[in-house]
Image: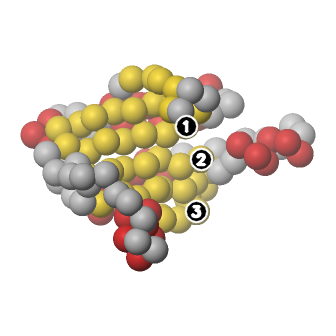
Amino acid sequence: MKQTLLQEKYPIFVAEIGKAETTYQTVDALVDYYKGKIAENPKVQFIGVFDHYAHTSKIGGPIVDGMTAAVDIIFCFGFAIPNPQMLAVRPRSIGIADMGDKFVISFMEAPMQPANQAMEAWTLALRNA
């Protein structure tokens, strides 16, 4: 898993997982996997799945060559609300892009270390699973 800055300002984590490296072969299977991980933690709330690929296709927006699917799994780790500004960085999402022979999974760094650790662990566990 690589940590980087997207557009020089958004701290994100990115994992490229070849389809030969995992038993999960579809975006739907990965969505079900993450929904299961979210459901295992009573402090995390599943919100929904946004089909970003379908939306962008519908409005005629550009899509990178080779991408066949792209979704965001939306959920919240909101353990506390220490101030009103905390709402600006919630909820969380994990993006899954199907690039043909691999999945690109990404998420923005959370302001809470336990959330980052969980999302990273869930993602790294996909290899050879």
| Disc 3/disc 2 C-alpha distance (Å) | 10 Å
The answer, for residue 114, to whether it is visible in the render is no
Q: Quick check: 123 left or right of 21? A: right
Q: Mark 3 points at which residue?
A: 47
Q: Are marks 3 and 1 in contact (CB under 8 Å)?
A: no
Residue position marked by numbered label 2 in the rendering: 92
Q: Where is residue 27 in the image (x, y as percent from the top left)?
A: 28, 58
Q: x and y percent of residue 45 in the render?
A: 60, 55
Q: Is mark 1 on a helix, strand or loop?
A: strand
Q: Compared with residue 58, is residue 108 higher up or lower down, i.e. above or below?
A: above
Q: Which mark is residue 20?
A: none
Image spot of residue 52 (x, y percent): 44, 63
Q: Are marks 1 and 2 in contact (CB under 8 Å)?
A: yes
Packing grade of label 3 (10 A; few <14, some 14-19, many >=20) is: some
**Residue at the spot 28% in from the left edge and 35% down from the top edge:** 16
The reply, left or right, for residue 113 in relation to residue 70 is right
The disc at residue 108 is: 1
Density class for disc 2 (Cα within 10 Å; few <14, some 14-19, many ≥20) is: many
Work out whether residue 111 or residue 81 is closer to the camera in this orientation and state it: 111
**Residue at position x 42%, y 40% from top?**
106
The local secondary structure at tag 3 comes to strand
**Could you say whether the residue bearing mark 2 is in a helix, strand or loop?**
strand
